[in-house]
């Protein structure tokens, strides 16, 4: 087991290196010059040239990348071009908010998605199934910008139950988390439904029924546990994507997450910040997948890592 | 290491203290809110983070005005106007040849750290901006100071043109006269900073700035808020009126608008959301909260004068006649007035008698035919991809199609558009909207040197028309040599002549001059002009006040 984890972590290092290389090359190929963005409208050619040299942007790609890796090895992510603050500090300032939103989002996804999917599966082809599937379809396809603003308008402006955006307490978290939950819950409902349907025709479920177990017991105890496997890997993925920032929901709710940081950095080609955000998201995705894989054996003893 | 044994009394004393501290801690929340209540706190919202507050570096419309409240320059503007006035300087004199300015500093002005401002600080500040290590985007403004080039290139240890006389006297000598020089002494880049703090904080100075300004940084939570508090020893008596300004960042303009109506926000930093604009202006209660004014802005299309067939002036004039500007203004809910020349109405040198090119499609087609393109041609227009710019670009496309000019639209990210404009032959036509543009200072030469001059005819500058007329350049140099206050009227007349000549060459299609609409809460007070101050966006932080305080 620990050998497996070690192997996965070693792989992760190489994946991360690959991610930094690809991002670096892409940013380098971008038809935009950060030095010009910093220098602004009135800068003379000399000013732009000097800024470019100070940032090391006049060096060839491999030299720049080498320098970047050298600093990275010392834990130095560089300084933001726009804010002049260390990227590490910028990321740290956003991490807690990102984490809470991730947690809240996944919570509501599961809270909405799992029961809905189970109900749909149990009442397959019936009215419940159809309404759940239509609901899931709407949830998945409704733009988060619209859902978020609607929730804000109704539950924070018209009837001020929740604060009008911002960060700092549980009350602030609920609406953005529900917005994420409505979108993600649709996916989970559909997935849960098909996973349940797969399982419900298995022999062991039939056996359980034949033994005279109640329907609730059959569904919850026998079917659900096995249907949860794909859900777990989905949570692992969501962990990664949410930790990488959810730009739209963060913007609508003034949530100081990593997505907002990334969005602003992209607008002004703030390369060190973009690199930092990409690195954090990649790490989160790798970590999320690893955790999901480690949870599998707990749910299904047949799965074992050597 | 072992804990030292304490006698029993000490331990008892300690636990009593502990209890007292705990009781106080429990009481604190009951008391704390009232500390802030008697204070005048203004809340401003922004969508984007506030970037660096280092006066030498900050150069976007958002941090520009915040920096003005934290630090000061030798010169400044009278609130709500474009009138220059001595600021950290008490007075100044100009030599007869117009090349040397001598400033007498106010005495007793102190930095936020308590140290008095002296003449050497002015020299240090300007040399810091000119030092390539600082990466200041403003270095170019001071390149005309004698010895600046040698210093920037590392050939000299100091800028010889900046001389410290006595403790309160500094004189600056230029290579050649520059009538806009005093404006550059009001730019943020020349705002005086204390050497010892810059040395101590290094790259973090932009995050913990120390100046002489009306406010100082109290708290800065990255990605959430920046809090400025009143500088009790600010040198202008009675200023600022506010005790505190809280900039909340990351707030979507739509949400900020709702919060303002609920009384949670005082100023919409990003303006009124365009979807709500008509509703606000049509609502008799809401439109009372909107201050309206002009700004030093012109929205224009650059025509690349070096690209076929746009290098033919007849074609450029034809394009000027093809655009229905009033329709474009309607597209943005009349938040602007149609423009016919380079300078905006607020700028000295604006020519109110100039008629510009008429909107005349027949005449435009005739010019195209004369130039050998009776059935038009195909070209490309670059534009920023943020609303309303794609809509404006489409309107331009339709207007040009009506005279047979087929336009391919490239609506792209701001940085890509800027890059295309600064590349030789990169952008045949470019719509300037959404480029985060503000005038640096209210002098007509600010519209010439960076964006229309031969001096800026190089890759990477903002002369996107790739325009250069040596005769015009000579005239601007002559105008810039008219530095004496008595020559102001003659200089403005000269600029009217200059920009008529520029319009004859038609490197631009001026489209409109945007107006400012600042929405504020009902409790905000002060002259309406302070909320649309031509120098301060969104408002003049030092001068506005909260009513009833």
Image (cartoon, rainbow, N blue to C red):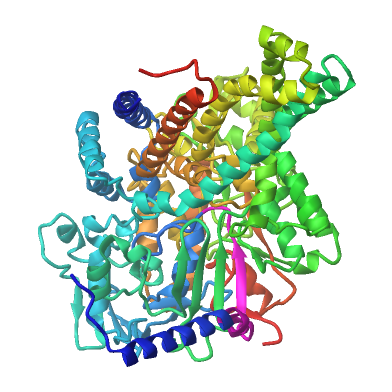
Residue furthest to the front = A211
**Magenta segment:** B28-48
Would you identify the image quadrant in which residue B119 lies?
A: bottom left
The tally of labels here is: 0
The N terminus of chain B: image quadrant: bottom left
Name which residue lies at 16% across and 61% down.
B151
Q: Is residue B278 above or below residue B303?
A: below
Residue B395 in view of the camera:
no
Quadrant in the picture for the C terminus of chain B: bottom right
Residue B431 on image: x %, y %:
56, 39
Front one among B110 and A25: A25
Q: Is residue A78 above or below residue B55?
A: above
**Does the stretch in magenta take in A128?**
no
Residue A237 point in image, percent of width and height: 52, 28
Name the foreground residue: B123 vs B275: B275
Residue found at the very far right of the displayed protein: A127
The residue nearer to you, when weighing B512 against B438, is B438
In depth, the one of B469 and B84 nearer the eye is: B84
């Amino acid at each position: 087991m620990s050998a497996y984890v070690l192997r996965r972590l070693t792989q992760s290092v190489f994946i991360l290196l690959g991610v930094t290389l690809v991002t670096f090359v892409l940013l380098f190929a971008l038809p935009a010059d950060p030095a010009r963005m910093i220098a602004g409208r009135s800068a003379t050619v000399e000013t732009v040239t000097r800024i470019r040299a100070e940032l090391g942007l006049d060096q060839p790609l491999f030299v720049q990348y080498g320098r970047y890796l050298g600093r990275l090895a010392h834990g130095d992510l560089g300084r933001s071009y726009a804010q002049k603050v260390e990227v590490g500090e910028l990321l740290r300032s956003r991490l807690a908010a990102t984490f809470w939103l991730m947690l809240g989002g996944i919570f509501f996804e599961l809270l909405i998605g799992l029961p809905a999917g189970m109900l749909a599966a149990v009442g397959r082809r019936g009215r419940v199934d159809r309404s759940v599937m239509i609901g899931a379809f709407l949830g998945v396809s409704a733009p988060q910008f619209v859902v978020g603003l609607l929730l804000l308008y109704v539950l924070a402006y018209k009837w001020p139950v929740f604060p009008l955006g911002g960060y700092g307490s549980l009350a602030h978290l609920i609406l953005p988390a529900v917005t994420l939950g409505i979108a993600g819950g649709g996916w989970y409902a559909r997935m849960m439904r098909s996973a349940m349907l797969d399982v419900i025709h298995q022999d062991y479920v039939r056996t359980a029924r034949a033994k005279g177990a109640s329907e609730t017991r059959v569904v919850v105890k026998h079917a659900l546990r096995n249907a949860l496997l794909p859900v777990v890997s989905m949570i692992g993925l969501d962990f990664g994507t949410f930790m990488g920032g959810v730009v739209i929901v963060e913007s609508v709710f003034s949530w100081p997450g990593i997505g907002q940081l990334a969005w602003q950095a992209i607008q002004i080609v703030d390369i060190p910040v973009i690199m930092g955000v990409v690195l954090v998201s990649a790490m989160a995705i790798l970590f999320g997948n690893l955790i999901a894989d480690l949870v599998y054996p707990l749910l299904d003893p047949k799965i074992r890592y050597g | 290491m072992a804990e030292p044994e304490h006698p029993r009394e000490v331990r008892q004393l300690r636990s009593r203290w502990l209890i007292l501290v705990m009781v106080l801690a429990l009481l604190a929340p009951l008391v704390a809110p009232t500390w802030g209540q008697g204070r005048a706190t203004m809340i401003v919202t922004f969508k984007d983070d506030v970037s660096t507050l280092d006066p030498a570096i900050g150069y976007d419309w958002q941090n520009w005005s915040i920096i003005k409240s934290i630090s000061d320059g030798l010169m400044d503007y009278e609130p709500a106007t474009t009138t220059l006035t001595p600021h950290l300087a008490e007075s100044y004199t100009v030599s007869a040849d117009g090349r040397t300015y001598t400033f007498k500093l106010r005495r007793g002005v102190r930095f936020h750290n308590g140290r008095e401002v002296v003449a050497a600080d002015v020299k240090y500040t300007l040399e810091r901006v000119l030092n390539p290590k600082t990466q200041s985007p403003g270095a170019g403004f001071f390149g005309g100071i004698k010895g600046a080039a040698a210093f920037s290139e590392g050939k000299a240890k100091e800028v010889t043109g900046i001389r410290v006389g006595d403790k309160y006297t500094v004189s600056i000598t230029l290579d050649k006269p520059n009538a806009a020089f005093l404006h550059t002494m009001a730019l943020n880049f020349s705002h005086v900073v204390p050497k010892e703090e810059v040395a101590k904080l290094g790259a973090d100075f932009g995050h913990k700035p120390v100046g002489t300004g009306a406010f100082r940084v109290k708290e800065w939570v990255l990605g959430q808020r920046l809090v400025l508090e009143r500088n009790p020893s600010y040198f202008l008596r009675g200023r600022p009126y506010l005790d505190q300004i809280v900039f909340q960042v990351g707030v979507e303009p739509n949400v900020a608008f709702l919060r303002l109506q609920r009384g949670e926000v005082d100023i919409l930093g990003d303006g009124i959301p365009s979807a709500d604009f008509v509703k606000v202006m049509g609502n008799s209660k809401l439109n009372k909260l909107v201050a309206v004014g002009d700004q030093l802005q012109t929205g224009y299309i650059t025509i690349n004068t070096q690209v076929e067939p746009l290098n033919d002036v007849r074609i450029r004039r034809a394009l000027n006649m093809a655009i229905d500007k009033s329709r474009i203004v309607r597209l943005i809910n009349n938040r602007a007035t149609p423009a016919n020349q380079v300078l905006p109405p607020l700028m000295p040198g604006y020519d109110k008698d100039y008629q510009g090119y008429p909107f005349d499609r027949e005449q435009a087609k005739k010019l195209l035919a004369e130039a050998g393109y009776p059935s038009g041609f195909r070209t490309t227009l670059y534009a920023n991809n943020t609303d309303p710019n794609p809509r404006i670009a489409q309107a331009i496309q339709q207007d040009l199609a009506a005279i047979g000019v087929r336009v391919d639209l490239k609506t792209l990210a701001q940085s890509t558009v800027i890059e295309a404009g600064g590349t030789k032959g990169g952008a045949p036509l470019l719509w300037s909207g959404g480029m985060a543009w503000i005038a640096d200072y209210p002098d007509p030469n600010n519209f010439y040197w960076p964006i229309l001059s031969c001096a800026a005819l190089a890759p990477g500058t903002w002369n996107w028309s790739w325009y250069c007329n040596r005769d015009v350049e000579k005239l601007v140099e002559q105008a810039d040599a008219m530095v004496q206050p008595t020559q102001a009227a003659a200089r403005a007349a000269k600029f009217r002549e200059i920009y008529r000549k520029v319009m004859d060459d038609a490197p631009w299609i001026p489209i409109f001059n945007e107006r400012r609409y600042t929405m504020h809460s009902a409790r905000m007070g002060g002259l309406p002009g302070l909320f649309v101050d031509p120098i301060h966006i969104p408002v003049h932080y030092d001068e506005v006040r909260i009513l009833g305080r």
